[in-house]
Image: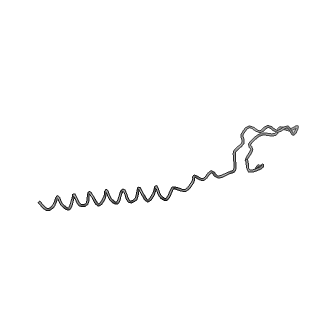
Amino acid sequence: MSVNGTYQFGISNSWGVSSVFQTYDNVAHIPPPPNEEYFLMIFFGFLIVGFYFLGKIARCGKT
């Protein structure tokens, strides 16, 4: 059952005595969103490196 956002697992015997042996949080842990500046720097870095190697390949064909 869910109590205060947690799930508790246990057993109850015939006298009504219950024992909880495991408790899980019912809260979704969402990672923070990625940093936009970091993403843009990586994107433009790959773009520049790609254009560099594209130029190297294009120049290699003109011998």
Q: Nearer the viewer, residue 10 or 29?
A: 29
Residue 17 x/y as whole percent: 85, 37
Q: Nearer the viewer, residue 20 or 15?
A: 20
Residue drawn where x is 81% and y is 40% of the image: 12
Scheme of image coloration: one colour
Q: Horizontal placement of 2 versus 46: left or right?
A: right
Quadrant of res 61: bottom left
Residue drawn where x is 40% and y is 59% of the image: 43
Q: Nearer the viewer, residue 6 or 41?
A: 41
Residue 63 x/y as whole percent: 11, 60
Q: Nearer the viewer, residue 42 or 16?
A: 42
In the image, farthest residue toward the left? 63
Residue drawn where x is 72% and y is 40% of the image: 22
Residue 41 x/y as whole percent: 42, 57
Q: How many marks?
A: 0
Residue 23 x/y as whole percent: 72, 42
Q: Horizontal placement of 26 versus 41: left or right?
A: right
Vertical comparison of 50 with 23: above or below: below
Vertical comparison of 6 with 16: above or below: below
In the image, farthest residue toward the right? 15
Residue drawn where x is 49% and y is 59% of the image: 36
